[in-house]
Image (cartoon, rainbow, N blue to C red):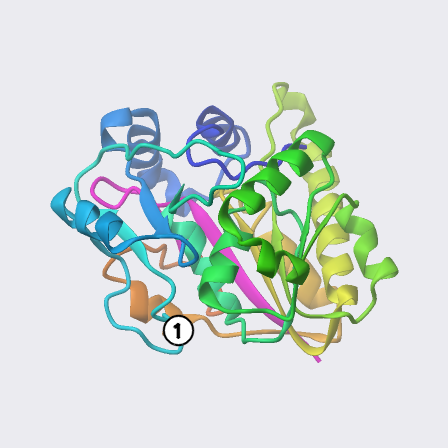
């Protein structure tokens, strides 16, 4: 059981899962492209999410000189002007900034597809938000660029990743806003019982799984589904009625994606799927999507020139 959201750290884990879990037959054609993009560094692309609390106009000018452009060019309720993310159509790595005590970083490097979870959740100012599996902090940082929640609880169960998450947030968020953020070290499966109906919006981001023995496939599928259901059921308990859950993974595995959501919808009478087609249409020029998913799901497929993803996203509403 392995949690990560670093763009390419888990590439080999993803690829092993891709082959090991027998992703769907409809994706067989895509397997070569997927492998080729993720294992060839010269195809990799990085998005640059600007930090509205510290970024300068000089940085934006520098990005333009390097042929970076805004990912979302028309501010709207879905793409607020404060959410500035730059991408380049050409592959290449942008330098990361080092952590310096007392100094905020100007930008965060990420896979642009991960922003779709933030856009899907549509956070409004003053809402209470839970980022259940938050490390290393990209979604929490993007959330605070998107809106000003009344509370953001960024949770991480692993102790080392918890400290990484805490340092990341301190590198991007001014002290004056840290009172809005709670960084917690809790088992996400227990948050729903500890904080029932507390949150307006919840992110659940997990899981990448890797195993090495083919005779364990059925057992691991069952165990994995069980774990993911516990996370999502906990998230549903933590939501107030009328609240929204966005579940995402960075894998193509049907067992971790569709099967989890279908099971939740079949077993939870107080949850409804939410149509994501408007979001898909608004970003379809920048991302490649699988066509064989349901209307409450998005599946971003990496390809040359659009090396974003893989990223699965689904949205549910608690009634």
Compared to 60, does 22 lie above or below? above
How many dots with numbers?
Answer: 1
Residue holding disc 1: 78
Q: Is residue 142 magenta?
A: no
**Image-based side of 139 in relation to 95, left or right:** right
Camera-side residue: 125 or 92?
Answer: 125
Residue 294 in view, yes or no:
no
Q: Farthest top residue?
A: 213
**256 above or below 31?**
below
Looking at the picture, does residue 270 appear above or below residue 98? Answer: below
Q: Is residue 308 magenta?
A: yes
Looking at this view, name the residue that lies furthest to the right: 194
Q: Quadrant of the N terminus?
A: top right
- Percent across and percent down for residue 298 are 44, 59
**Quadrant location of the C terminus?**
bottom right
Residue plotted at (43% across, 31% down): 98
> Which residue is painted at 73% across and 32% down in the image?
159
Q: Quadrant of residue 212?
A: top right
Q: Position of residue 99 (x, y in %)?
A: 48, 33
Indicate the secondary structure of the residue bearing disc 1: loop
Q: Residue at x 23, y 33 (%)?
A: 92
Residue furthest to the front: 102
Residue 107 appears in view:
yes
Q: Nearer the viewer, residue 316 or 42?
A: 42
Q: Position of residue 14 (x, y in %)?
A: 48, 32
Q: Is residue 238 left or right of residue 249?
A: right
Start-end of magenta stretch:
299-319
Q: Position of residue 113 (x, y in %)?
A: 39, 51
Image check: 187 left or right of 280?
Answer: right
- Quick one: 308 or 180, which is closer to the camera? 180
Crowd around label 1: few <14 · some 14–19 · many ≥20 (10 Å): some
């Amino acid at each position: 059981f392995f949690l990560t959201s670093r763009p390419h750290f888990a590439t080999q884990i993803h690829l092993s899962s891709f082959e090991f879990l027998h992703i769907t037959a409809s994706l067989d054609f895509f397997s070569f492209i997927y492998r080729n993009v993720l294992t060839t560094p010269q195809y990799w692309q990085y998005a640059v999410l600007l930090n509205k609390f510290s970024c300068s106009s000089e940085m934006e000018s520098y990005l333009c000189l390097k042929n970076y452009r805004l990912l979302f060019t028309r501010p709207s309720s879905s793409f607020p002007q404060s959410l500035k993310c730059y991408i380049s159509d050409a592959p290449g790595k942008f330098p990361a900034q080092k952590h310096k005590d007392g100094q905020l970083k100007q930008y965060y490097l990420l896979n642009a597809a991960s922003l779709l979870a933030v856009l899907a959740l549509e956070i409004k100012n003053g809402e209470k938000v839970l980022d259940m599996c938050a490390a290393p902090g990209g979604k929490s940082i993007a959330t605070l660029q998107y809106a000003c929640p009344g509370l953001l609880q960024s949770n991480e169960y692993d102790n080392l990743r918890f400290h990484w998450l805490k340092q990341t947030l301190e590198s991007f968020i001014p002290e004056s806003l840290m009172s809005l953020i709670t960084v917690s070290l809790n088992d996400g499966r227990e948050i729903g019982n500890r904080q029932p109906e507390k949150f307006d919006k919840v992110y659940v981001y997990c899981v990448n799984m890797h195993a090495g023995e083919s005779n364990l496939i059925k057992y691991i599928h069952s165990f994995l589904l069980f774990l993911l259901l516990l996370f999502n059921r906990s998230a549903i308990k933590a939501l107030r009625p009328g609240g929204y859950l966005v579940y995402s993974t960075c894998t193509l595995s049907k067992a971790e994606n569709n099967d989890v959501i279908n099971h939740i919808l079949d077993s939870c009478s107080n949850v409804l799927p939410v149509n994501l087609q408007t979001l898909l249409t608004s970003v379809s020029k920048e991302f490649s999507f699988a066509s064989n998913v349901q209307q409450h799901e998005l599946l971003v497929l990496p390809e040359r020139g659009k090396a974003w993803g893989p990223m699965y996203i689904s949205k549910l509403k608690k009634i």
